[in-house]
Amino acid sequence: MNNTFASNQFPLSSKYHPEWIRASVSGGANPLWLIEWLAEGLNLQPNMRVLDLGCGRAMSSIFLHREFGVQVWAVDLLFSVSENYQRIRDAGVENGVFPIHADARSLPFAAEFFDAIISIDSFFYYGTDDLYLNSLARFLKPGGQLGISGAGLMQEFGSKFPEHLQQWWTPDLWCLHSAAWWQQHWERTGILEIEVADTLPDGWLLWLK
């Protein structure tokens, strides 16, 4: 099998069939690469309860359960929860991945329910709100982990965007920010201790691939 998405950089992701990845992807990025990279900075242990926020077609949720043995609540607003459940059943992980249709701003969970909250390539759609972290963090147990990865900027710029972006930039892209911006956005709340805020080396090349 010629696996377009095989990469020495992402050995766990390389095990998954390229056609399954193509059929399951919900945006421009390969979420398996993003989640594998993000997981390097997390401490995921079997049977932990994990919220996969903005999970799209739940491929990141399936990956998390298979590779780390965690229980995953796969939450998305835009994609069919029934289709996600079928995809989860087809993957044989229905006992460890639970699809839920919900808005990120109105989550139906108890306080301190999760050991970890993860968001792959979706957090910028809602997480830039100055008050959002206050709302989300209450679902984490004390000492819990919160990690996000997705598209962003290498550095911030003002109201005039760089010339090389002029033909590509649209108003909805103002939600994209740099790792440094996210670090400041979270640190100033005093809610979280930031351990890692970085960018994936040559991430733009991986996006093109």
Image (spheres, rainbow, N blue to C red):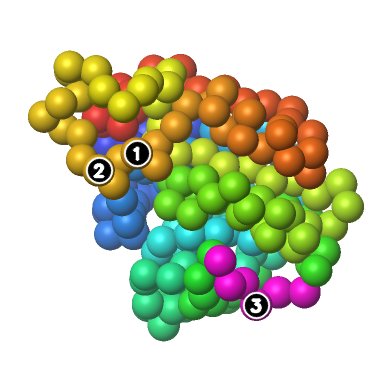
Which residue corresponds to the image point at 63% horizontal and 53% vertical from the top-left? 131
Which residue corresponds to the image point at 20% horizontal and 24% vertical from the top-left? 165
Which residue corresponds to the image point at 46% horizontal and 46% vertical from the top-left? 124
Q: Is any atom of residue 156 visible in this view?
A: yes
Q: Is disc 3 in contact with disc 2, using a CB cutoff of under 8 Å?
A: no
Earlier in the chain: of badge 3 and badge 1, it is: 3
Which residue corresponds to the image point at 82% horizontal and 64% vertical from the top-left? 112
Task: Give the residue type that dot 2 points to.
Answer: Pro
Task: Please give left or right for residue 192 compared with residue 3 in the image.
Answer: right
Q: Main secondary structure of the magenta part?
A: loop
Tell me the element at label 3.
loop
In reply to whether residue 108 is colored magenta, the answer given is yes
Instruction: Categorize mark 2 by other alpha carbons within 10 Å: few (<14), some (14-19), many (20+).
Output: few
Residue assigned mark 2: 171
Question: x, y (%) of residue 21?
Answer: 34, 52
Tell me the element at label 1.
helix
Q: Disc number at residue 202?
A: none
Task: Please give left or right for residue 13 compared with residue 168 in the image.
Answer: right
Task: Give the residue type that dot 1 points to.
Answer: Trp
In reply to whether residue 89 is colored magenta, the answer given is no
Question: Can you say whether 78 is above or below 208 in the image?
Answer: below
Residue assigned mark 3: 108
Tell me the element at label 2.
helix
Near-viewer residue (83 or 75) = 75
Q: Is the C terminus in the top left, top right, bottom left or bottom right quadrant?
A: top left
Near-viewer residue (79 or 65) = 79
| Residue numbers of the magenta segment | 105-110
Q: CA distance from mark 3 to mark 2?
A: 31 Å
Residue assigned mark 1: 174
Question: x, y (%) of residue 18?
Answer: 31, 47
Task: Please give left or right for residue 88 compared with residue 173 in the image.
Answer: right
